[in-house]
Image: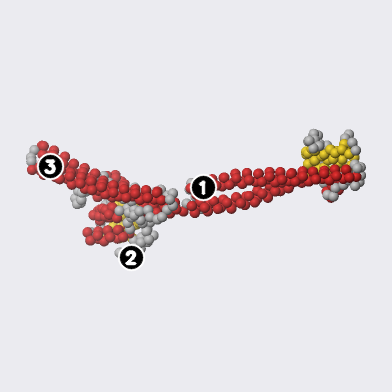
Amino acid sequence: MLRKGSIAASMFWLSAAWLVLALVTTGVLLTDLYSRALDTTLTETLDFHVESLTGALLETGDPQSPDITLADPRFERPRSGWYWIIHDSDGALINLSTSVVGLDLPQLDMDDDAFGRSSGIVADPFGTQLRVVQRTVTLDGQGYRIAVSGNLTEMLKLVSDFRGQAFIVLGAVGIMLAAMSAFVARIALRPIARLSEAVEAVREGDSAEVSGTYPTEIAPLAEEVNELLRSNAQIIERARNQVGNLAHGLKTPIAVLRNEAAAKKGALADVVSSETEKMSNMVSTYLERARLAARTSVVGKKADATMIMLRMTRVMRKIHPNVTIAFQRPDASLPWFRGDEADLEEMAGNLLDNACKWSSGQVGVRLSAERGDKGTQLLVRIDDNGPGLSEADAQKVLRRGVRLDEKTPGTGLGLDIVKELVDVYGGSLELKRSQLGGLLVELRLPTARLGGLVRPQGN
């Protein structure tokens, strides 16, 4: 099926428009040629009849002789449109065919050519169009004008019938050619569809590069895409190395300043200690952001969310043995997470760990697929039966380092790290009231295809 806006559809409609124009033009030209051929044949037939009458006139020597006749039976049938008449030089009627009896035919008002011949079109009293050929001959010094007419209306009807049949045939040919054009367009554009599937496979993580053999017209495009992927991987690798070098280069001087300030007393030492702490936090913040951005910029990664959540619930059950974690395992049709496995572990681990810390002994975990404006997304829902959060507190805890309860161990960076990762992947994070009485966390992330893998069974 040709989709609107596709190359195949554009080729089809352009071809169809050209076919319509070409076939209509062909039909008009064929009809005109056929009309000319019939008119030429009619004129030649009339010329032959004029010659026959001239021969009969010269043979009998009497223009009124009943032996002057034509064998064509149409000249015997009234109103047939096939008539012959002989006039003298004064215009008086001398002889005529049986078909003319009782009719007053108009004469041609045309001059003869060098051979004493003229031709034209008139109409009989019944409105029939006639093609007339007339010739002047001389017998015994007396001039006679012989006129023979043929039924032009019959010929025009043949032309009309031919035109209708021609356009029916050309229309059928046009439909077949249009179908062939659509078929050829689809066949010719199959390599582009294969290239699109190969690029999609790279994006979904099924392949590391665009593979396959393509025609010479699009083979360079496939190579450029692969080169772009290789260049992207190299740039990310260099960025990771630079981030690591920067972290190592900054942390050591900051640690030296912090230690020196701690060994001294006074206002200057306090200022240095306070500012180095800010510097350390700022360096950690931006290095973490750079690390996340570099890691999630790699094309073609995906992870099985079901297996990751199974693994995380096992870990959390060991870390929080007093908490009951209920994981509702989804069916095998659940799409995969399109991203790095470690990132999903970090997001899910932080959220699940917070739920266990704040719960009163009960935590629920659910995975599902949700369709929305951004297409199909992976929905991770984690809720607990703890104290929960107000709407204002829910917005506040997403800020870096903010903690509502200093008694609970932690740095306050967990939710903010999750938020950073969610933003990088173009997902969303919402904190709501749970039906268990505590906090409900809804995490939405992009999805990838299953990739043909089979998930193991069991918890």
Residue at label 2? 457
Q: Is residue 166 above or below residue 305?
A: above
Residue 189, position in %: x, y? 47, 51
Report whether 348 appears left or right of 219. Answer: left
Residue 59 can be seen, yes or no = yes
Residue type, mark 1 in image: Met
Query: Element under label 3?
Result: helix
Please name the residue shown 37% across and 50% down the image. Answer: 223
Residue at label 1? 11
Please name the residue shown 41% across and 51% down the image. Answer: 219
Q: Earlier in the sequence, mark 1 or mark 3?
A: 1
Q: Is residue 324 above or below residue 289?
A: below
Any mark on residue 257, and which?
3
Please name the residue shown 28% across and 49% down the image. Answer: 234
Residue 447 can be seen, yes or no = no
Q: Which one is in front, 54 or 91?
A: 54
Q: Earlier in the sequence, mark 3 or mark 2?
A: 3
Query: Element under label 1?
Result: helix
Spatial distance from mark 1 to mark 2, Cα to Cα?
50 Å
Q: Earlier in the sequence, mark 1 or mark 2?
A: 1
In the rendered structure, are the residues bearing label 3 and label 2 in contact, judged by CB atoms less than 8 Å apart? no
Residue type, mark 3 in image: Leu
